[in-house]
Amino acid sequence: MLIEAIADDFNAIPGGIVRPGLHLAPDTVIAPPDVLDMLRDLADDIRQLFAPSAWWIVNGSEVVGLCSVIRAPHDGDVHIGYGVAPTHQGRGLATMAVGQILAWARQDPRVTQISAESGLENIASQRVLERNGFLRVGERLDADDGPVICWRVVVA
């Protein structure tokens, strides 16, 4: 299940409680603190132009990952990124989350397509996108992540 993430949620994650009814297990690391800070700031910036901008990936009542818009939408293209804590990977949670993002996008008239990127070596992420109907549309060299595959799915 996806639940919209707000700034206060990002700030509460290190304490293990996201908001009433949601928790983070002690052994679950969604991302290092500096990455969470960056994602919070990015979500806040994008939220000024486009909302929702980030969602917690929730299993039961436990926050297990994050999916977010990672750059301001342009001409109906919403570019997403996602991640599931290592202790929860391999259970189909990322596939479910991306599927729910697509269901949301198909109901939002502002969105015509969803794009994403996966590391060239990240086979699991490539499978998540393939299972959700994304098509490989190219490759590029990212300054931080190295070679990445570019993906897109039309939703409108």
Image (cartoon, rainbow, N blue to C red):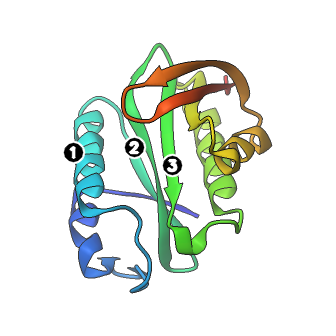
Instruction: Indicate which disc residue 52 carries.
Output: 2
Q: Residue at x 36, y 57 (%)?
A: 5
Q: x, y percentage for residue 45?
A: 23, 36
Ranked by sequence position, the earlier of labels 3 and 1 is 1
Name the residue carrying label 1.
41
Quadrant location, the C terminus:
top right
Q: Is residue 19 visible?
A: no
Ranked by sequence position, the earlier of labels 1 and 2 is 1
Left or right for 18, reference 107: left
Q: Is residue 114 visible?
A: yes
Quadrant location, the N terminus:
bottom right
Left or right for 68, reference 111: left
Between 59 and 76, the one nearer to me in the picture: 59
Q: Choose mark 1 or mark 2, whichever is in front.
A: 1
Left or right for 117, reference 130: left
Identify the amino acid type marked 2.
Pro
Identify the amino acid type marked 1.
Asp
Name the residue carrying label 3.
82
**Secondary structure found at label 2:** loop
Q: Choose mark 3 or mark 2, whichever is in front.
A: 3
Q: Is residue 30 above or below residue 76?
A: below
Dot 1 alpha-carbon crowd within 10 angstroms: few under 14, some 14 to 19, many 20 or more: some
Dot 3 alpha-carbon crowd within 10 angstroms: few under 14, some 14 to 19, many 20 or more: many
Q: CA distance from mark 1 to mark 2?
A: 14 Å
**Secondary structure found at label 1:** helix
